[in-house]
Image (cartoon, helix red, strand yellow):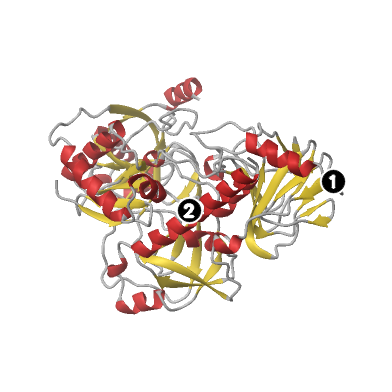
Amino acid sequence: MEYNCYPLGENAVLIELGKEINIETHQKIKGIAKFLNDNPPEWMIEYIPAFTTLTIYYEPYYIYSTFGTENIYEYVCKEIKKLLLKIPIGDENEPRNIEIPVCYGGDFGPDLEVVAEYNQLTPEEVIQIHSSGEYIVYMLGFAPGFPFIGGMSEKIATPRRKTPRLKIPERSVGIAGMQTGIYPIETPGGWQLIGRTPIRLFTPENNPPTLLMAGDKIKFTPISYEEYVKMENELL
Amino acid sequence: MITVKRAGLLTIIQDLGRCGFQKYGVIVSGAMDQTAHRIANILVGNDENEPTVEMTLVGPTFQFQEDALIAICGGDLSATINGIPVHLWRPIYVKKNSELKFSACRNGCRAYLAVAGGFKIDKVLNSKSTYLRAGIGGLNGSALQTGDQLSVGHYSILAKKISSSLSKQVKNGYFESKWGVNPKRLTATQHKNIKEIRVIRGRQYDWFTEESQKHFFRSPYTITNQSDRMGYRLQGAKLTLATEQEMISEAVNFGTIQVPPDGNPIILLADRQTTGGYPKIGQVIQVDLPIIAQAKPGEKLCFSEISLTEAHYLYMEREKYINEIKNGIQLKFN
């Protein structure tokens, strides 16, 4: 496995596995994340998988006092080298398939018309294209449970709003450039909002606290406003 | 029970952070000045991760409904007990019905109040740290409000020993120990107009123009008003990329200095996002993070370069000193 290590301060090392976002790099990162999850090294605190990198956090003093080395970063890089050799290549686990119901347009999707107009489509066509795609969650970041999703059709790509909204309601589904995403908590943001899901993406009482995880496959299913209200009442 | 009589500007419960959930995009949070937080806990015989109360610039007032063993560390917010000024960095025994009041900020920005036994609060995702944006942790996910009440947990064996040694000499409703910690050995205390911050080069340091690289390590940067627990926005010589490069979001850390397209650097702090998409020009070293946490808007910072090896050396020295403090207190009460 080809990779490069870079320090991210005294307590983290960033492993770069590719220079651009693609499925191959994503699979490698998923493989490493799974391995770390199942076999956490004793010096590791936690890890963050991202598009082309995976970052491991550690406690430098633990390494110093447990393994008696002053070359902390060297030690960590050597351990990573050993660890990456153990990771099976091509042993791909089936991704989880998650369906996300979305009530498109109306008050939930105030920018659906904008997306349609920008791409010279009707709102119905935007919904059809958005809900027929197969998507992959590359990573979670930005906010708790916020998925960075790949696989959206170019036909509905729309630039961000010039002025971000100060408050985007939680569970809003939006588009920003070539990306689509869902806001797990209320935050400010510049995405074009096209709908809302009744499903919670971040439940801090649960472990894991998020509906989605890096590597998941997702599909959006259009639902009516009545179905939305019914599901929201059942779920929240 | 401890009652919040007046809440102050931003008074929040923090521990050492919500670790282990960053892969789900969950923000770490935790005390901004982790050294002050840890020492405050150590002085009252607590585990270092017990939650403390973090107070910012304008401090709160507390009323004690029971006897307590406390320590205040970090910035100087003019703490008084029953109207009498008390010292920072030492354990203090406080009698029931006493009032602990913080007022003007004389030095630094954030003070930490540790209470022996910690606070009885439910953990959310393995931490008691408050993360305001998601409304989780602390007391009902929010900052402390006037009228809130904090329940104190069980004392450790060491806390009981420290407490009983001080309780015999109470005067005016409290007693301060004669011993404490000298903070000068923990953090390079700086009273200069420009605070010097040591920085390791960031992963995208080479992306910046030679001129920007020079400016970054030479010119002063002012902390703007747009600064909070998430990050400090700085103003100074603008930093520009040599060529436009696409940056793919990747992990960031406490103290990461990233540069958005407007060229004004941002230092990411306790409530930072887990990942970021702006080029990282540098990384503040761990032992200098408390200097940042204690710096206020309007103050100036100046960055100087240090190697990772040196930074690790300084980190170990600090940890060894904190261990010395812990062992010293243990021995004293054995």
Write the residue at 38% across / 56% down. A10
Whole-percent x, y for residue A208 in the image: 40, 30
Write the residue at 63% across / 40% down. B334
Whole-percent x, y for residue A235 in the image: 47, 23
Can see residue B5? no
Q: Is residue B84 above or below residue B300?
A: above
What secondary structure is found at the residue carrying circle 1? loop
Tell me if mark 1 has few (under 14), some (14-19) or many (20+) residues whose alpha carbon lies within 10 angstroms of its own. some
Whole-percent x, y for residue A125 in the image: 28, 38
**Viewed as shown, does residue B230 lie left or right of B2?**
left
Q: Is residue A94 above or below residue B260?
A: above
Q: Which chain carries label 1?
A: B
In three-dimensional space, the C-alpha distance between marks 2 and 1, rounded to whole angstroms, equals 35 Å
Q: Mark 2 lies on which chain?
A: B
Query: Do marks 2 and 1 share a subunit?
Result: yes
- Residue B295, disc: none
Q: Name the residue under label 1.
A: B173
Identity of the amino acid at label 2? Answer: Glu
Question: N-terminal of the two: label 2 or label 1?
Answer: 1
**Viewed as shown, does residue B156 lie left or right of A62?**
right
- Residue B319, disc: 2
- Circles 2 and 1, Cβ within 8 Å, touching? The answer is no
* Residue A226 placement: quadrant: top left
Write the residue at 40% across / 78% down. B215
Q: In this view, does A159 lie above or below A182?
A: below
* Residue B284 placement: quadrant: bottom left
B127 or B6, nearer to the observer = B127
B247 or A230, nearer to the observer = B247
Residue lying at the far left of the rendered structure: A90
Can see residue B290? yes
Whole-percent x, y for residue A89 in the image: 13, 37
